[in-house]
Image (spheres, rainbow, N blue to C red):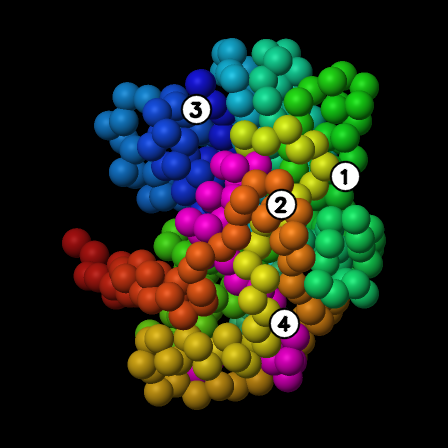
Amino acid sequence: MRVLVTGAAGFLGSHLTDALLAEGHSVVGVDNLCTGSLENIGHLQNEPRYTFVQQDIIEPFDLGPVDYVFNFASPASPVDYARLGVETLRVGSDGTRNALNIAHRYQAKFLHASTSECYGDPAVHPQTEDYWGHVNPIGPRSVYDEAKRFSEALIMAYHRYYHVDTRMVRIFNTYGPRLQKNDGRVISNFMIQALKGEDLTVYGEGKQTRSFCYVSDEVDGILRLSRSKEHLPTNIGNPNEWTIIECAKAVLKVTGSSSQIVYLPLPQDDPTQRQPNISKAKRLLGWEPKIDLETGLRLSLDYFRSCIAAETAPTH
Ligand code: UDP
């Protein structure tokens, strides 16, 4: 297949690209580099089946016929989407529409990276796909949450009215090599703080929970979904739920760091709990994650060490 990946220089987009190339496909990657990084795709420079185009998908674009569109473009960390609020809303509306138009034009299949943020601060726990969510439509996270929810509505409309062959994955917290080191996410912050011997910054009392999926498990689930015929959203995430304090302790253990934990204010609308119910993915795709948090953190150690080495390397 000739596959289009938007957000191709991002954390997930770049890992997805690697997996698609490994399956023998050709990939056209598009990214405006507002949060993605060329370093994530540097290893593909001499890959004849890979083309990279720097392009903002908010503007209409056409890179020729494709068989599959993976729509992964969006700022995704709370710090990034707070900084790029309007851009985030636009990529989830105009950007998704432009990507859908390509799928429609070339009768390509379409898979969209949606998010557990569609559930907001969930009143149903764990979250099943049929839960409509509990989202503040005007709070600081709304630029991301409502962009992603609008994308889902638009995708269902293209599916219902234009018969585009669409899929949506609701992605829960995912981590691993190539996470941006400064994007403010909990795993990248804690790993870098621990490796530098700095205090680990726990927000609030650290009793809020998240469920962390290692990136290779996430990509495996996404590829399985891409081959299925399921048009409704499917949760792909690791159902092991951790409090943020437990997560900090896991990072201290894996890094062997003697950093201290400090407590900072909880950001507004920070969800109190997050855990995917993955019964649907298990039943439909035969998928479940294999890598537990400590193993995944160990697999990420070299990457975070290299981020710190790059920071401190002398410049000539
Ligand atoms: N968090 C924290 N310390 C940090 C960064 C994040 O305690 O240095 C908390 C944050 O308040 C949230 C959780 O960790 O409850 C996950 O935050 P993240 O930004 O990774 O993603 P979210 O799941 O909130 O989108």
Give how far apart the Cα atoms at labels 3 and 2 are.
Answer: 32 Å
Q: State whether residue 138 is above or below residue 75.
A: below
Circle 4 residue: 209
First in residue order: circle 4 vs circle 1: 1
**Which quarter of the rendered picture does the N terminus lie within?**
top left
Name the amino acid type tagged 1.
Answer: Phe
**C-alpha distance separating marks 4 and 1:** 26 Å
Q: Is residue 53 left or right of residue 303?
A: right
Q: Residue at x 41, y 42 (%)?
A: 15
Q: Which residue is mark 1?
A: 150
Q: Quadrant of ligand 1?
A: bottom right
**In this rendering, is residue 65 above or below 300?**
above
Q: For the point 78% across and 35% down, which residue is it?
A: 153
Q: Secondary structure at mark 4?
A: strand
Name which of mark 3 and mark 1 comes first in the sequence: 3
Upstream in sequence: badge 2 or badge 4: 4
- Mark pair 3, 4: CA separation: 37 Å
User: Where are the magenta residues, as a range?
Assistant: 199-225
Quarter of the image for residue 86 reads: top right
**Residue highlighted by disc 2:** 283
Please name the residue that numbered disc 3 is placed on. 28
| Dot 4 amino acid type | Thr
